[in-house]
């Protein structure tokens, strides 16, 4: 059931997250799941898609970067730039997300990223406490809105998202952003205060970029796929200097 959107947005601002209830219907979910698998298996190829294979060990520190597509496998941890896929783009631009994005971000909206986070049937990798922003993201302002859709059921034992409610209000832990250091985790008693957000397939959750969030390993023997999109103000600029600055795809534009 779709929760009241304005109430959800108020909860998001206050607590850093909000549940919207089930928004994706079964046909949409089926399409997105099948498409994720077809992309991982190389049955469909889309130029410029980003892939990250999971580590063999299930340790976050053993993940490799920059290797891209490494052949057919359902053990990819992350697929990115999914706005290039028409099915995913249609979901990114669904009217409920448009209403939320315009309310939180403003009238002109771009996306920083659109990713499938997959914890495969073989377990996947735990994602430590982190914040999505800071110098690591290289932007001239901090984005705030991520919209996360469960493509599969995501109970606690599948490695559902966990949050530290209200932590976004303290801002970035370090200017760099990303993984939250063990000393800060201890100081805030984050492990003891973690709130798991188990979800059913089709459920949607708003996540503030700066809320501390994490997810564990998947012990269900079934894939736990989720789709996460970061929406931001179209005026946001990429600050990177080593390569040409990124430009960000505009969404919710009526005439394409
Ligand atoms: O799906 C997950 O396990 C984590 C998602 C996440 O970190 C995000 O959407 O920013």
Image (cartoon, rainbow, N blue to C red):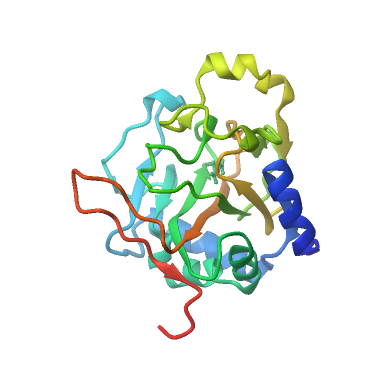
* Above or below: residue 140 compared with residue 219: below
Which residue is depicted at the point 61% across and 59% down?
104
Question: Which x, y percent locates residue 156?
Answer: 70, 36
Question: Which x, y percent locates residue 2?
Answer: 78, 64
Q: Nearer the viewer, residue 156 or 212?
A: 212
Number of marks drawn: 0
Question: Which x, y percent locates residue 145?
Answer: 57, 53
Q: Is residue 127 left or right of residue 240?
A: right
Q: Nearer the viewer, residue 114 or 212?
A: 212
* Above or below: residue 158 compared with residue 38: above
Examine the rendering and report whether any part of residue 159 can be seen.
Answer: no
Q: Quadrant of residue 247?
A: bottom left
Residue farthest along the bottom direction in this orientation: 255
Q: Nearer the viewer, residue 56 or 105?
A: 105
Quadrant where the image shows the C terminus: bottom left
Quadrant of the image where one finds ligand 1: top right
Which residue is depicted at the point 54% across and 59% down?
33
């Amino acid at each position: 059931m779709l929760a009241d959107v304005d109430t959800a947005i108020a909860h998001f601002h206050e607590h850093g997250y909000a549940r919207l209830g089930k928004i994706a219907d079964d046909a949409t979910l089926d399409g997105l799941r099948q498409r994720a698998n077809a992309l991982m298996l190389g049955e469909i190829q889309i130029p410029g898609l980003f892939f990250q294979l999971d580590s063999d060990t299930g340790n976050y520190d053993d993940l490799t970067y920059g290797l891209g597509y490494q052949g057919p496998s359902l053990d990819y941890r992350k697929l990115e730039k999914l706005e290039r896929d028409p099915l995913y783009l249609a979901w990114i631009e669904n009217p409920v997300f448009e209403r939320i994005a315009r309310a939180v971000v403003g009238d002109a909206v771009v996306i920083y990223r659109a990713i499938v986070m997959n914890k495969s049937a073989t377990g996947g990798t735990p994602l430590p406490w982190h914040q999505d922003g800071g110098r690591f993201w290289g932007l001239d302002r901090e984005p705030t809105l991520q919209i996360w859709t469960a493509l599969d059921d995501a109970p606690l034992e599948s490695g559902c998202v966990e949050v530290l409610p209200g932590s976004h209000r303290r801002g970035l832990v370090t200017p760099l952003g990303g993984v939250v250091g063990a000393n800060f985790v201890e100081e805030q008693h984050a492990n003891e205060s973690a709130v798991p957000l188990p979800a059913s397939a089709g459920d949607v959750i708003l996540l503030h970029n700066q809320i501390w969030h994490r997810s564990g390993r998947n012990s269900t023997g079934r894939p736990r796929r989720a789709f996460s999109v970061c929406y931001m103000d179209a005026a946001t600029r990429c600050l990177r200097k080593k390569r040409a600055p990124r430009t960000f795809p505009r969404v919710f534009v009526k005439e394409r």
